[in-house]
Amino acid sequence: MVDHATLSNLIAPVLVPVFLEEYWQRQLLVINRDSPLFFSGILSLDDIDKIISSIKIPSTHLDLSKDSAPIPKTDFCIGEEVDLPEVMNLHRSGATIILRSLHRWSTPLQAIKLSMEKCFHCPAQTNVYLTPPSNKSSPPHFDAHDIFVMQLKGSKRWRIYEVPLPLPLISERFDPVKHPVGTVCREFTLHPGDLAYLPRGTVHEPDALEYSVHISVGVMVKTWTDLIGTMLKIASVRHVELRKALAVSPSGGAFDSTYTLDSFASCVEFLKDPSIALEALEYISENFISSRDVSVAGQLRLISTGSETPSLDTLVCRREGLIHRIRRTNGKVHLDFRRVTLSLADELEQTVRFAAEKQSFRPRELPGELSDADKVGFVQRLIEEGFLIIKD
């Protein structure tokens, strides 16, 4: 089975450099593979059935819609509890089941989410749509995040409309009054094994031709707006001028536009400091890394058998999808991941990079000025913190 967790395999045969240069944030990509089993092993109807019947899915993670309109939660929820028999009744009558963030309960979907976050260095999520034949789950609309659609079962026709708002921000929700939908500019059909990439802002309308199951992988990118907003916060700490109140007109009742325009250029000048841009970039990156989850799969078994302690010859590898960074400050090299920072002497940078970037290795192979005991201790710490796993 293909490892679908990686972008390169999801968009095959399109190469990642080609995708990033020609499609990412630019245009629609549709890949019709004529390979119904391409996504086999990721998620089946039996998997979904088991999840929703054995795990109490929160009402915030399950929605229903029919004939392009959402169904009120009061129709299928009792308080905060999902009434599953009623969900099935509504689904039987044509309602689409929308399972939001299903990666919380599916290991393969979690792997896809983590891989996409590592690739694009921003949050990602996976939603699953189960749509009965001849049903539309939503009217024409756009999303404020980029979407990868993976068709698992059945066929779904997609209509693409003219874009009213290119690359909307996360805060810019679709509003049919503010964003009138234009004419249809393209249609395509996804069959099992097919994939489509929709840049955020792409107005789309899916229509199930037969019973359809698809995964929607949403990527919530960081934009220049995010960076400049963070820069402004940093600059305002450094420069008191940015913290001054806007001047009001001497006659009252309005701001003094002449004074504002005269002062505007000098205020903007503060944002031209490259160090502020770098600090803002560092801040955004640090926040993202520290907020990411780390899989602890397999640790219970190791703890219970007492085999979590490595030896010099234990084969270890980095956890899949783990997001990290290596930086140097004040004579130290730091390995950041999750909410952990491992700091070592600057001369051990080679050791840190080897452990973080090597596909798999044994503690004995670690380079640098470390004793055998220190090598084992270093690897042990990374195992306990969830960065490495024992591969043997």
Image (cartoon, helix red, strand yellow):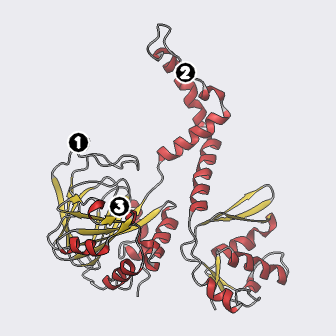
Q: Nearer the viewer, mark 1 or mark 3?
A: 1
The image's mark for residue 177 is 1
CA gap, disc 2 and disc 1? 37 Å
Checking the image for residue 263, the label placed there is 2
* Residue 117 placement, left or right of 96: right
Q: The disc labelled 1 sits on which kind of residue?
A: Val
Where the C terminus falls, by quadrant? bottom right
The extreme top residue here reads 251
Badge 1 marks a residue whose secondary structure is loop
Q: Would you identify the image quadrant in which residue 103 lies?
A: bottom left
> What distance separates the C-alpha of mark 1 from that of mark 3?
29 Å
Position of residue 167 relative to residue 115, above or below, is above
| Residue occupying the point 24% across, 63% down | 65
Q: Amino acid at mark 3?
A: Tyr
Give the mark nearer the N terminus: 2 vs 1: 1
Q: Is residue 165 above or below residue 119?
A: above
Q: Are marks 2 and 3 in contact (CB under 8 Å)?
A: no
Label drawn at residue 23 = 3
Q: Which class describes the residues within 10 Å of circle 3: few (<14), some (14-19), or many (20+)?
A: some
- The answer to whether 223 appears left or right of 59 in the picture is right
Measure the alpha-carbon separation of dots 2 and 3. 41 Å
Q: In which quadrant of the rendered image does the N terminus lie?
A: bottom left
In percent of width and height, residue 186 lies at 18, 60
**Can you tell which of label 2 and label 1 is closer to the viewer?**
1
Q: Is residue 374 left or right of residue 6?
A: right
Q: In the rendered image, which quarter is residue 300 located in?
A: bottom right
Q: Residue at x 40, y 60 (%)?
A: 21
Q: Can residue 150 be spotted in the picture?
A: no
Work out whether residue 331 or residue 260 is closer to the camera in this orientation and state it: 260
Against 229, residue 127 (above or below) is below
Left or right of 319 on screen, residue 261: left
**As rendered, which of 136 and 148 lies closer to the eye?**
136
